[in-house]
Image (cartoon, helix red, strand yellow):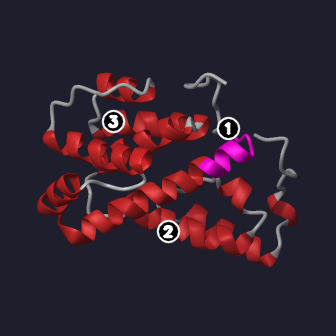
């Protein structure tokens, strides 16, 4: 998957690495696809990150569609090949429209049919572009989703930016990835 990191052999894993591997493989993900084989070289980071990731992916209070939409925005902004490759089919299955996903991939404004999709996109793009969110977008997000879910959305965006950075720095690809969604 990468030539920037030493190959990882689970048969020679340290006790700390084995604990992380077991938790990832027995959890809701059930696989090591994505940044985990990079993080495993730092087992303590891997443990904290994978637990945060499980929360951000499954327990934010957002629907799967909205979470996956936010992940696609992140993958596009970071041009994270593996992140897009892994999450695109999940997003489509969760109800993100193909045309919206394609517009996001091409850094174009989608013509959203759903107001929640437009709001998540606006929140994420404002945060990535301005490093802040406007008062108007913040107020709409809190009104629609509440403070807790808004906080969780920020966490989700931050976590998937970490994933994207990991994948990009270590030139990682997804298992089975045979194409790149972004030019290199």
Whole-Å distance between the Cαs marked 3 and 2? 23 Å
Q: Which residue is labeled 3 in the image?
A: 93
**Quarter the C terminus occupies:** top right
Asked if disc 3 and disc 1 are in contact, CB closer than 8 Å, the reply is no
**Majority secondary structure of the magenta segment?**
helix
Asked if 147 appears above or below 159 in the picture, the reply is below
In the picture of the structure, the residue carrying the numbered disc 2 is: 52
Snapshot quadrant of residue 57: bottom left
Residue 107, disc: none
Give the residue drawn at x 31%, y 55%: 133
Separation (CA) of disc 1 from disc 2: 21 Å
Would you place residue 105 above or below residue 44 in this image? above
Circle 1 packing at 10 Å, graded few (<14), some (14-19), many (20+), is many
Q: Name the residue under label 1.
A: 173
Can residue 62 be seen?
A: yes
Magenta-tinted stretch: 165-172
Q: Which of marks 1 and 2 is nearer the N terminus?
A: 2
Please say whether residue 137 is one of the residues in the magenta stretch: no
Q: Could you tell me which secondary element the residue under label 1 belongs to?
A: loop
Q: Residue at x 42, y 44 (%)?
A: 129
């Amino acid at each position: 998957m990468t030539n920037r990191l030493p190959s990882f052999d689970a048969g020679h894993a340290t006790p700390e690495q084995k604990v992380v591997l077991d938790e990832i493989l027995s959890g809701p993900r059930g696989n090591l696809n994505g940044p985990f084989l990079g993080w495993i070289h730092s087992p303590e980071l891997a443990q904290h990150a994978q637990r945060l990731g499980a929360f951000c992916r499954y327990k934010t209070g957002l629907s799967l569609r909205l979470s996956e939409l936010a992940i696609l925005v992140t993958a596009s902004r970071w041009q994270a090949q593996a992140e897009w490759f892994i999450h695109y089919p999940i997003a489509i299955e969760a109800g993100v429209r193909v045309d919206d996903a394609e517009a996001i991939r091409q850094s174009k404004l989608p013509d959203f049919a759903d107001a929640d999709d437009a709001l998540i996109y606006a929140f994420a793009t404002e945060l990535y572009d301005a490093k802040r969110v406007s008062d108007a977008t913040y107020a709409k997000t809190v009104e629609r989703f509440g403070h807790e879910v808004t906080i969780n959305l920020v966490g989700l965006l931050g976590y998937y930016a970490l994933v994207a950075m990991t994948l990009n720095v270590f030139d990682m690809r997804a298992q089975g990835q045979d194409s790149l969604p972004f030019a290199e």
